[in-house]
Amino acid sequence: MAHVIPYIAAIQEAIREEMERDERVLYFGQNMATSPDDPFLKQFGPARVRVTPISETAEIGMATGAAMAGFRPVVELYMAEFLLVAADQVVNEGSRFHFMSKGAVTVPMVLVAGYGFTYGWAGQHTGSIYGMFMGVPGLRVAMPSTPADAKGLMTTAIRDDNPVLFFHHYLLALTEGEVPDGEYAVPFGVADVKRSGSDVTVVATGNTVHSALAAAETLAERGVSAEVIDPRTIAPLDVDTILGSVARTGHLVVVDQATRHASAAAVIAAEVAQKGFSSLQAPISLVTALDSSIAYAEPVESFVLPDEHKIVAAVGETLGLAPLPG
Amino acid sequence: MATGYPTDDGALEAPAPERLVWMYTQMYRIREFEERVKSTFTAHPGVIRGHTHLADGAEGSIVGSIAALAPGDQILTSYRCHGYPIALGTDTKAMMAEIYGRSTGLCGGLGGSMHLFDPARGFLGGSGIVAQHLPHAAGAAWAAQIRGAGQAVVCFFGDGASKQGAFHESLNIASLWKLPVVYVMENNHYQASTRSDQEDANAAAGEPLAVKATAYSMVGITVDGTDPVAVHATVAAALARARAGEGPTLVESLVYRLSAHGNLIAPPGVPLHYPEHEAVAIFGNQAEYEAALRGDPVPRFRHRLVTDGVLDALDADALEATVREEIDEAERFALESPLPAPDSGLAYVYA
């Protein structure tokens, strides 16, 4: 059985169910659980649910320490950029400890952060910075595009024995979708084919999955069959599913809200260029943000971001079709 | 192993004579171990790679603090971390093998001198980045608070760490949440190559660094870190407060690091060694350094125990000989141990 809830509620549902299942799961962060009426605080109490000061280094560092001491903390960071305030704690502490200790300690923690809030939030709160974490050994990086994936990936994140960065997309927060009832886990490193097709493979993450699906719809009206793949986690990255698709379609377009050289798309393209070169009938095309910060004013904001029309145009170019008006 | 618990009336018991001998033994073991690490740079060039930091001069502070722990307590440390696990009972053979990068090392040669871990004995690890383990200690203390079994955490760091944001964020939240943690700042008066008064506003104003605790409404106390008995009493009292739900304490333990910050940092081809202490090498203050050597806490504590009749001089000689044999064996074991298989690290990237 399933129920329909918003993406953001699906994340909360997974956290709540895991907290019910496992009393070692803690949930804390800024601006949460400030009132005794907070549902998490009411259900799980102040030992496990706490509001913190604006101290990202302490929040993430404490999660690391509590994890080493046997708990499974979930830290609500709100915005991805706030991870950068505590960059050492994200990439150079907990992610190293299992390795440096030859497995003597584990750091099962989840850092929850929203990204890509391109809705007038301007230069410092809109970044798509997941790419900088996907190559950090010891870290896992999940970025769901649907409510069901949001629930299933959060469940897996909490159960994983490694530090997990869970990036939810702010523009998807209120989008509704079917979510399985009860325990539901989506495995890491397993891409999902969001739409099957035979002419071109379009790989996209987060909110751009929906742009890619809209583009695929437009392309279908013009006789082009696009397959849309969502890796769902970029660390681990399911390269095999992408290679298998490209082996059938011969064409690859990778969509990413990050700037080109900081994107997961560049890594995906490199993997396919090396391992799937003989399948490719045309150069790989990347549809990414232009190399700019995100502007406050709407037309400037939109100009740099990937969208459905840019994806349609890139597919047309890759397939050598006459220019398709978006 | 614990001593120094509050008695029913709240007073602290002084360590029993055998406990004082235990403390001296641990101080001597740490010193001998680190002297052997230091001599390895010349006796076996190339065996120790990278950067290694010694705690000679801080043995009294280390052992006095560790002696105050109870079973189930946990510690976290900076990268100057050899002494604590030695006092906790970690095998010195495995530790030396780790520092020599061998497969038999405590962490299979994957961690090295700065990254020792022994969670089975309560040692949750040493972070190589200044002050970044202070929030880890707060987190472990939060875990202890939730478990509610009266356990506490002791976090060791240098005075340099108190200039990091992680220090201030951690003390604030530890005090706010009344976490059972004791922050032991070993103030050796030098950061890597600067004197405290060059970078610490309190030091420049002539104040103890323990005053930083005042900003976070927690107890701050300064203790002579060369005296293990004084450190023991101070840390034991702080642990008693922590266990009683009265929150954290900042203990400023005054020590003098007798070696340079670390061995020479040099590119391949330059033999590594321990340079002269910064007091001499940078500031030309030979008199200060020689005074510190005369105050060396290890022979001083031996002298005190012998003078007080706690330890017979011949017994002291005997225990020192036993320790030297232990460290000889640790060195031999480490030298004879194989290097790890090149691909051994790939098994430990993810849990």
Image: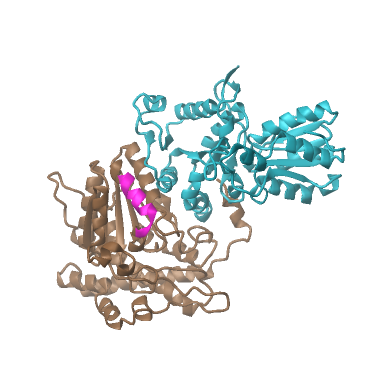
Chain colours: A cyan, B brown
Residue A258 placement (x, y as % from top left): 63, 44
Q: Quadrant of the C terminus of chain A?
A: top right
How many numbered marks, from 0 up?
0
Q: Is residue A110 visible?
A: yes
State the image quarter where residue B253 is shown: bottom left
Residue B97: percent from left, percent from top: 49, 65
Tell me which secondary structure the magenta stretch mostly adopts: helix
Residue at point 30%, 83% (across, down):
B286
Q: Which quarter of the figure has residue B204? A: bottom left
Would residue B169 be counted in the magenta stretch?
A: yes
Which residue sits at x=80%, y=34%? A325
Q: Nearer the viewer, residue A142 or B205?
A: B205
**Residue at the extreme left:** B9
Residue A38 point in image, percent of width and height: 39, 26
Q: Position of residue A251 (x, y in %)?
A: 82, 41
* Quarter assignment of residue A306: top right
Q: Is residue A45 above or below residue A57?
A: above
* In the image, residue A157 above or below residue B290: above
Quadrant of image for the N terminus of chain A: top right
Chain part drawn in magenta: B163-174
Q: Is residue B76 left or right of residue B43?
A: left
Front residue of A239/A130: it is A130
Is B30 left or right of A284, judged from the image as shown? left
Left or right? Give the position of B312 relative to A259: left
Q: As displayed, is residue B204 above or below residue A159?
A: below
Q: Is residue A25 magenta?
A: no
Q: Nearer the viewer, residue B24 or A82?
A: A82
Residue B189 visible? The answer is: no
